[in-house]
Amino acid sequence: MAIKRISIFVLPDDTKVVRQFRIPGFLPGFFALLLIVLIPFLFWVLRDYQTTKARMLRLAQIEKEYEQQKSQFIHLAQRIDQVTLKVGELTEFDRKLRTMVNLETNEADTQIQGVGGSSPILMDPKQTRAKNHKELVRSMYRSLDNLDSEIVDGKHHKAELQKFLENQKMLLASTPSIWPTKGWLSSRFGYRVSPFTGEREFHRGIDIATRMSTPIVAPADGIALYVGWDGGYGKVLSIKHGYGLMTKYGHLKKALVKK
């Protein structure tokens, strides 16, 4: 069977020459079928290109956001490192204070104070930028846990120091440190010649000579333990200051406090 052909005539405007082309009869149908197949394919390629392009733009945006977040994490890690150093300085200052006030620190506390600090990854900026997101986050969590432990220990030590200082404040407030009245010292504490017997005796107090009715004040905090008469001392007032300390005042004209 002979292959049918299709003749195509071309008539140019500027020439009178007519050109004729002959193509196989099946070729138009083949091209039509090919076009029918290619149009959906080209449409799919175009759509896939647009989707891929959109994904690439989104991926670039995500990568940019990731870099920004990583920079923020690095900055936060460095801040954590700075806070850790400050906490270490406060811990050392606390240790010096406890040493100054003779507040003993047991071995367990010393070991606890040595635990903690920043992760080596956070200490070195080069390592920090080289590590991935997960490792950086884990390092930050470890450093935060260490900081939390040091803060808890610091609160415990500060509470102990505060309690100790309050006790010392009470002790100082209860320790006689001023003269009870204005005058001059007529007889010191210790051995003397008794003004009554003329013999050597141990004087267990001090005598302050002054004018009558001169005010007398307590030289420290305390509780009026006794107000009354006591032999050669006349009218006396005894004050209990605590911590094993007590003072006694004799030869009073009157007492303005009661037991």
Image (cartoon, rainbow, N blue to C red):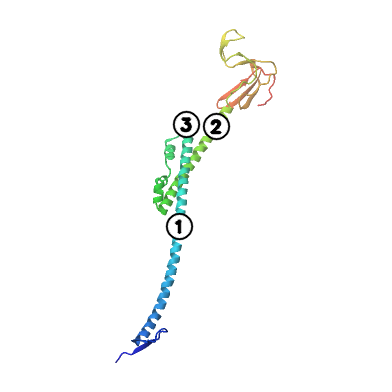
Q: Locate residue 208, reporting x and y percent.
A: 63, 16
Q: Residue furthest front?
A: 15
Question: Judging from the image, what secondary structure is the residue with disc 3 in?
Answer: helix
**Amino acid of disc 3:** Thr
Q: Locate residue 192, reporting x and y percent.
A: 57, 11
Where is the C terminus found, in terms of image quarters?
Answer: top right
The residue indicated by pointer 2 is: 167
Q: CA distance from mark 2 to mark 3?
A: 16 Å
The residue indicated by pointer 3 is: 99
In this view, the mark in front (2 or 3):
3
Question: Judging from the image, what secondary structure is the residue with disc 1 in?
Answer: helix
Q: Locate residue 81, reporting x and y percent.
A: 45, 44
Task: Identify which residue, 75 or 84, lies in the foreground.
Answer: 75
Question: Is 62 above or below relative to 246?
Answer: below
Q: Is residue 96 left or right of residue 185?
A: left
The residue indicated by pointer 1 is: 64
In this view, the mark in front (3 or 1):
1
Asked if the residue at tag 3 contacts the one at tag 2, i.e. Cβ–Cβ closer than 8 Å, the answer is no
| Quarter where residue 109 is shown | top left
Q: Locate residue 169, reporting x and y percent.
A: 56, 30
Question: Is 174 above or below relative to 59?
Answer: above
**Amino acid of disc 1:** Lys
Nearer the N terminus, badge 2 or badge 3?
3
